[in-house]
């Protein structure tokens, strides 16, 4: 559902270390076997997944940080408000 997980036009930004070197760019492939990025310079790079340390930009991190702050009463009130909209 796009409401819960919105689609992004741009791939997430990643920082990774491979073979002792740091790389940064747009994540193109991340599967069971490979990791591939496109660096800012436009260069394509790929590695076997188990050979890199990677940090992916979390675009929903702010929303996730709010979840523990909401009480059951808060969620009930929001749900009741949304149900009342017509």
Image (spheres, rainbow, N blue to C red):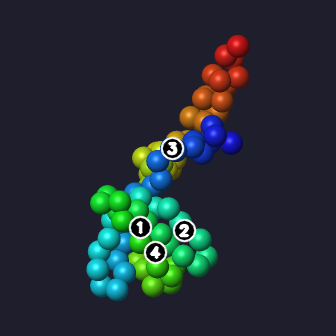
Dot 3 or dot 2, earlier in sequence: 3
Q: Which residue is mark 3?
A: 9
Dot 1 or dot 2, earlier in sequence: 2
Q: In the rendered view, does 2 fall on the left or right side of 11? A: right
Q: Residue at x 51, y 44 (%)?
A: 9
- Which is closer to the viewer, label 2 or label 4? 4
Asked whether disc 1 touches disc 2, contact meaning CB atoms under 8 Å apart, the reply is no
Dot 3, crowdedness within 10 Å: few (<14), some or many (≥20)? few
Where, quadrant-wise, is the C terminus in this rendering? top right
Dot 1, crowdedness within 10 Å: few (<14), some or many (≥20)? few
Q: In the rendered view, does 1 fall on the left or right side of 24? A: right
Mark 3 vs mark 4, CA separation in Å: 21 Å
Dot 2 or dot 4, earlier in sequence: 2
Q: Residue at x 61, y 28 (%)?
A: 77
Q: Secondary structure at mark 2?
A: strand
Q: Which residue is mark 2?
A: 30
Dot 2, crowdedness within 10 Å: few (<14), some or many (≥20)? some
Mark 3 vs mark 1, CA separation in Å: 19 Å
How many marks can you see? 4
Q: Secondary structure at mark 4?
A: strand
Asked whether disc 3 touches disc 1, contact meaning CB atoms under 8 Å apart, the reply is no
Mark 1 vs mark 4, CA separation in Å: 7 Å
Dot 3 or dot 4, earlier in sequence: 3
Asked whether disc 1 touches disc 4, contact meaning CB atoms under 8 Å apart, the reply is yes
Instruction: Establish if 67 lies above or below 55.
Output: above
Mark 2 vs mark 4, CA separation in Å: 10 Å
Q: Residue at x 68, y 42 (%)?
A: 1
Dot 3 or dot 1, earlier in sequence: 3
Q: Estimate the x, y position of residue 5 in percent, counting from the top left.
A: 60, 45
Which dot marks residue 46?
A: 4
């Amino acid at each position: 559902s796009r409401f819960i997980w919105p689609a992004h036009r741009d791939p997430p930004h990643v920082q990774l270390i491979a073979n002792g070197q740091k790389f940064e760019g747009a994540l193109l492939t991340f599967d069971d076997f490979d990791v591939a990025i496109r660096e800012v310079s436009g260069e394509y790079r790929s590695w076997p997944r188990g050979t890199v340390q990677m940090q992916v930009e979390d675009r929903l991190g702010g929303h996730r940080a709010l979840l523990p702050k909401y009480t059951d009463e808060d969620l009930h009130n929001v749900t009741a408000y949304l149900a009342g909209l017509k």
